[in-house]
Image: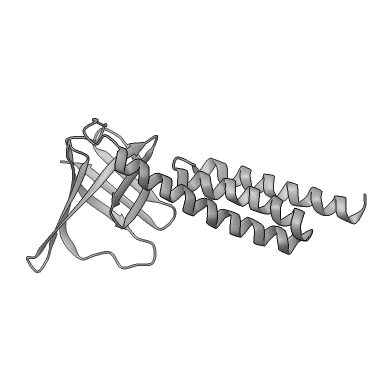
């Protein structure tokens, strides 16, 4: 096999391997799907244009970034159009935080931390601190598959979640894990 065919074959194997590794991670949101598809298309375009591993890697990076941005905009559009009066399995439930792990960041010093999922798609977190102060955070939420999508005007958080009768566990990549008990 000549060098060009070997490079193309290796590149396609690398792209397919990345797709196989990343695909099980989810793609429950358009942001994730856009990043994955963009990386694949970018890698192929990089190889076709630059005919080198470096060009392939750069193409994959640029494609993933562009796909992520396009998917993120689509997710935000979906959030604006979503019918928040549609009930979910979390609607009308209230939970108390029992474990919070923010990987490498100090845990907030709170005495109690409650999360309530209201029928109108509003998620209200009530945080009571040791000094007697209270913080109330109001966000919107919706569910797509096993992803809890929490958002405000300036951010979207995609948390994988599992729920049993009395336990709700939310994780965001390897950066955040919260375990809550039903109240």
The answer to whether 96 is drawn above or below residue 84 in the figure is below
The answer to whether 47 is drawn above or below residue 93 in the figure is below
Residue 159 in sight in this render: no
Q: Residue furthest left?
A: 132
Q: Position of residue 174 (x, y in %)?
A: 44, 55
- Kindly identify the residue that appears in the image at 76 percent across and 53 percent down: 48
Q: Residue furthest right?
A: 1
Q: Position of residue 90 (x, y in %)?
A: 24, 36
- Kindly identify the residue that appears in the image at 60 percent across and 46 percent down: 21
> What count of labels does the image hold?
0
- Kindly identify the residue that appears in the image at 93 percent across and 49 percent down: 1
Front-lying residue, 173 or 104: 173
Q: Position of residue 50 (x, y in %)?
A: 76, 60
Which color scheme does this rendered protein use? Answer: one colour
Q: In the displayed structure, does residue 35 sit left or right of residue 159?
A: right
Residue 139 in sight in this render: yes
């Amino acid at each position: 096999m000549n060098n060009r065919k070997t490079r193309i074959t290796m590149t396609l194997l690398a792209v397919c391997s990345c797709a196989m590794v990343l695909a099980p991670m989810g793609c429950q949101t358009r942001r994730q799907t856009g990043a994955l598809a963009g990386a694949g298309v970018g890698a192929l375009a990089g190889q076709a244009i630059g005919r080198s591993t470096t060009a392939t890697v750069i193409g994959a990076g640029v494609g993933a970034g562009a796909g992520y941005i396009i998917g993120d905009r689509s997710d935000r559009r979906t959030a604006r159009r979503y019918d928040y009066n549609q009930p979910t399995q979390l609607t009308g439930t209230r939970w108390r935080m029992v474990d919070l792990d923010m990987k490498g960041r100090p845990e907030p010093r709170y005495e109690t931390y409650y999360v309530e999922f209201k029928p109108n798609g509003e998620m209200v977190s009530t945080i009571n601190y040791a000094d007697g102060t209270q913080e109330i955070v109001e966000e919107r939420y919706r569910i797509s598959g096993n992803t809890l999508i929490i958002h405000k005007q300036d951010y979207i958080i995609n948390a994988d979640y599992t729920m049993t009768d009395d336990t709700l566990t939310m994780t965001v990549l390897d950066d955040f894990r919260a375990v809550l008990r039903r109240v």
